[in-house]
Image (cartoon, helix red, strand yellow):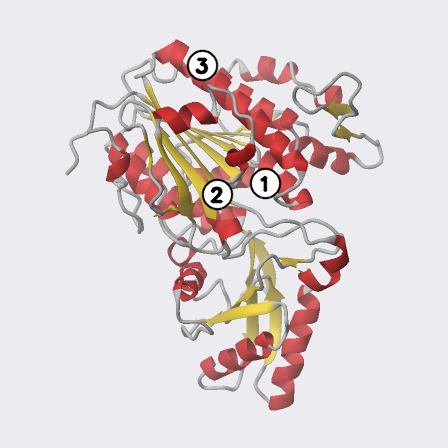
Amino acid sequence: MLALPPRPKLYVLVLLDQFRPDYLDSAPLTPGGFRHLMEKGAYFPDCRNLASTFPASSIATLATGAWPAQHGIVADTWYDRSIRKPVPANDEALLATTLAAQVAAADLRARVSVVSLDALQGALFAGTSDARQFWMDDAGQFATLSDPPPDWLTAFNSQRSLASFHDAKWWALNARTGAPPLRTLTFLPERPKEFLRLYRSSPFALTAQFEMAAELIVRDKLGLGNTLDFLCILTGSTGLLGYETGARHPLMQQMTLHLDQKLETLLNLLTKSLGEKGFNLVLTAAHGAPPEPPTELRDRMAVKGEGLARAVDRNLSTSGDGRVEKYLYPFLYLDAAGFRDPEPIRVAAGRAALEIPAVANYYTAGGACSVQDEWKRRLRNSFHPTRSGDVMLSYQAEYVEEFGEGRGISYGSLYSYDVRVPLFFYGPQFRPAVIETPVESVDLAPTLARAMGVPAPSSSMGRVLGEAFAP
């Protein structure tokens, strides 16, 4: 067993929704943000989420140290055959315990707090009602289920009216005088949801989340008591922006620069409040993102799910091999009534799907797979026997699901641009090092559990990253 340095009282986990390691390679970073973590912490530039990379799936994987095959959150939405309807991912659907739940259970005095942009994602990461959860509601205010809510929350919210951001300009950092804004958060009274989408995918919402976390640190004196404090800041703005623009848009670089500044401010606050050895900070991302398909290639690279399902259904019905009941990317749910063994029907559906140029691979509920290498493991990690239906499909590289808007991307693929994220461990328990050896996202929860001295989550599949710890 590792003999670790003394534990600080505060652990902070910054979990970015969508963030690729290459964002850090070309950005002009400040000395005190990401660059400080690179130089003073244990930095893994190649942390791999070797399963489907939907936001909900990836957050659950980081929270539980398990793959979707174990924790059951196979996508943001899946099809429930019992009610014949799609159902959204939520914390009640988790089939494994979370790190936050382990911390709360190990010490009844421990304070676990989650600050998120989205209520469902925050609850999913927490996995326990013992965690205090704060999220941004549709009015741009932070809400909580805590009863009573903190006495300072009303005053904090009153200083941040969403109306003050109507038609706000998003300027490039250090923009030259007279330069046009990168984006205007246009507000139209008849289209309030469009403005809310622009706001939540902007640096303004990102700033609000970090300010909320800072307020929580200061008001609750996190890390200054005799109990263990665990704070997770689960940002969502990068993920929402990525949905719209893809990975390579200039706005993503600007968002990286804003993140860098917020991280520097957070580190300065923690150091001033607790000292350099008074806290540990861990940072990673749930998943990456593909580039947006070029306009001239979008008709080919943006897959229309209904058309795919009809093509597979025609193939099956022609040969008498069942029908397609539902296709909800990336899962085919088949109607194989009257067949004693549905597996041949699943294989037939997978092979029919491969005849569509956009489809690269398939995996069935019976374990049949069109590939027998590392990709099979990624598909198997992603597949839950009930929720994933009969067949999981994987599209060709950089192909996306078309949602009917004629622009944007989808998440959830198994390719490196979605799978690879950065991982940082910073603080007195960790050593300065750049460790190029690939690690896996399921390693985060057991490593943090080891650092905090609590049991790993119940279905944890990862290993403790001993190479990150200080000798």
Proximity of marks 2 and 1: CB atoms separated by less than 8 Å: yes
Say above or below: 418 vs 365. Answer: above
Residue 180 in view = yes
Instruction: Please tell me which residue is depicted at 32% across the width and 26% down the height of the picture.
Output: 110
Check disc 2 and give the amino acid type: Ala
Residue 11 in view = no
Mark 1: few, some, or many residues within 10 Å (few <14, many ≥20)? many
Distance of label 1 from label 3 (alpha carbons): 26 Å
**Residue 14 found in image quarter:** top left
Place of residue 285 in the rendered image (x, y in percent of width and height, measured from the top left): 47, 39
From the viewer's side, name the closer residue of 206 and 149.
Answer: 206
- Nearer the observer, disc 1 or disc 3? 3
Question: Which numbered disc, 2 or 1, marks the residue that appears first in the sequence?
Answer: 1
Instruction: Identify the mark at residue 401; answer none if there is no mark.
Output: none
Instruction: Please tell me which residue is depicted at 49% across the width and 57% down the height of the picture.
Output: 414
From the viewer's side, name the closer residue of 450 and 420.
Answer: 420
Check disc 1 and give the amino acid type: Gly
Residue wearing tag 1: 239
Say above or below: 442 vs 3. Answer: below
Q: Secondary structure at mark 1?
A: helix
Question: Which numbered disc, 2 or 3, marks the residue that appears first in the sequence?
Answer: 3
Residue wearing tag 3: 268
Place of residue 469 in the rendered image (x, y in percent of width and height, measured from the top left): 25, 32
Check disc 3 and give the amino acid type: Asn
Q: Secondary structure at mark 2?
A: strand
Q: Secondary structure at mark 3?
A: helix
Place of residue 460 in the rendered image (x, y in percent of width and height, measured from the top left): 31, 49
Distance of label 2 from label 3 (alpha carbons): 25 Å
Q: From the image, which quarter does the N terminus lie in?
A: top left
Distance of label 2 from label 1 (alpha carbons): 9 Å
Q: From the image, which quarter does the C terminus lie in?
A: top left
Residue wearing tag 2: 286
